[in-house]
Image (cartoon, rainbow, N blue to C red):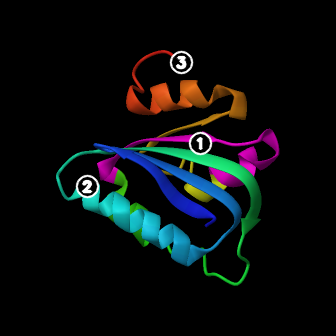
Amino acid sequence: MPCEIVEQDGSHITLRISGVLKKAELALAQKAAIEVMRSGKKVQLLLLVEDFKGWDKRDDWGDLSFQSRHDEQIETIAIVCEERWQELVELFVGKGQRPVNIRRFQPSQTALARAWSRHPGRKA
């Protein structure tokens, strides 16, 4: 599956995204995050973008309702991806356009990304 939750520890959710991402798969991951948010906790997301091929061109990616409804409940988004995907992934998650603390890491920095996403105030 191109988008799956591979770990959930309290309010920390790790998603693995690979292959061609479909909107329906992303919606399932967002639904799981909403369940955590219902407890009143802010969510920390770690996105592991591995063997990524892009986004399904047949899907409508213009729907930003999840962001507008839930950004205040998301504390961090750490993105681990190859440098060639950096700009597109940052654009996709709205880095610089959202009140969420978003940072990208190289694949060799996965442990650092995991630590940062849980404790963004610490120097990484």
Instruction: Give the residue pinned by disc 3.
Output: 124
Looking at the picture, does residue 24 appear above or below residue 36? below
Element under label 1? Answer: strand
| Three-letter amino acid code of the residue under disc 3 | Ala
Q: Which quadrant of the figure has residue 9?
A: top left
Farthest-out residue, left: 39
Q: Which amino acid type corresponds to the residue marked 2 in the rendered image?
A: Met
Q: What amino acid does circle 1 point to?
A: Ile
Q: Residue at x 49, y 15 (%)?
A: 123
Residue farthest top in this picture: 123
Circle 2 sits in a helix, a strand or a loop, which is it? Answer: helix
Q: Return the residue at label 1.
A: 79
**Horizontal and vertical percent for residue 76?**
43, 40
Q: How would you rate the neighbour count of disc 1 (Cα within 10 Å): few for under 14, some for 14-19, many for 20 or more? A: many
On residue 37, the disc is 2
26 with respect to 57 (left or right): left
At horizontal 25% and vertical 55% (from top left) the residue drawn is: 37
Q: Residues within 10 Å of mark 3 (few under 14, many from 20)?
A: few
Span highlighted in magenta in the image: 72-90
**Residue sitting farthest toward the right:** 84
